[in-house]
Image (cartoon, rainbow, N blue to C red):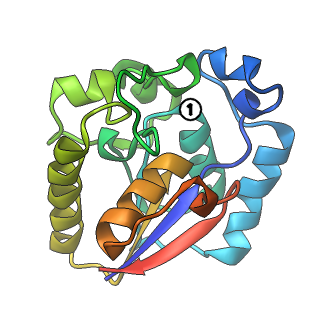
Amino acid sequence: MELVFIRHGQGEHTLNLPYSLYTTDPSLTKEGIIQARELRTQFPISEDDIVIISPIRRALQTAMIWTEGIGSTKLVSPLISPRIFPLKQDSKTLPCDQLLTREKIRKDFPGFILDKESSLNLWIYGINTIPENEFILLAKHFLEWCKKQDKKRIYIVSHDGTITSYRQYILGEKLSRDDFPKETGWFILNY
């Protein structure tokens, strides 16, 4: 099975660093919208595909724009929400990385399905600051779920730290922030 990890398009939280990291619920920028549209030619989606999306507005918008008009399954999961990489002890989630509530996702993205297997705690806090051993257990569970979908390819729209955390776990290699994908950059991993 191929897992295609795609970073969301440019978000408002990146325009005036470090101050913009304190923006709550940042959307895609105009450039981010263009990047999301360009995914249509790079990765044409079909109705048979599954797209799994982080419960953060910029990731949801990227998936919505990219898959517009296609009846593919769009599943929102906190298991691919933002993750600090590398994780630092006593890290705090910044306002730009706070998860949208399930109610807000239902209202703003009505065609998306919410992951019902994840705990309420994950839906509130996500995986941003959980210890590495907990992340590994959740990553293993998530990847096993992906395998059970019996699909040749699964698309995952997420964040630079999250993608790098999953890559490090799957590849068994030590990675760094230098390995982060750019906006709408991607990595294809066979699992």
- Residue 126 in view: yes
Q: Position of residue 153 (x, y in %)?
A: 39, 78
Q: Is residue 6 left or right of residue 100?
A: right
What residue is at 44 percent from the left and 49 percent from the top?
162
Q: What residue is disc 1 on?
A: 57
Quadrant of the snapshot with the C terminus:
bottom left
| Residue 30 picture quarter | top right
Q: Position of residue 104 (x, y in %)?
A: 44, 20
In front of the other: 191 or 156: 191
What residue is at 17 percent from the left and 42 percent from the top?
134
Q: Position of residue 15 (x, y in %)?
A: 82, 31
Kind of residue sitting beneath label 1: Arg
- Residue 159 in view: no
In front of the other: 184 or 132: 132
In front of the other: 68 or 183: 183
Quadrant of the snapshot with the N terminus:
bottom left
Per the image, label 1 sits on a secondary structure element best described as: helix
| Residue 77 picture quarter | top left
Q: Position of residue 81 (x, y in %)?
A: 41, 40
**Compared to 3, does 54 lie above or below?**
above
Label 1: how many Cα within 10 Å (few below 14, some 14–19, many 20+): many
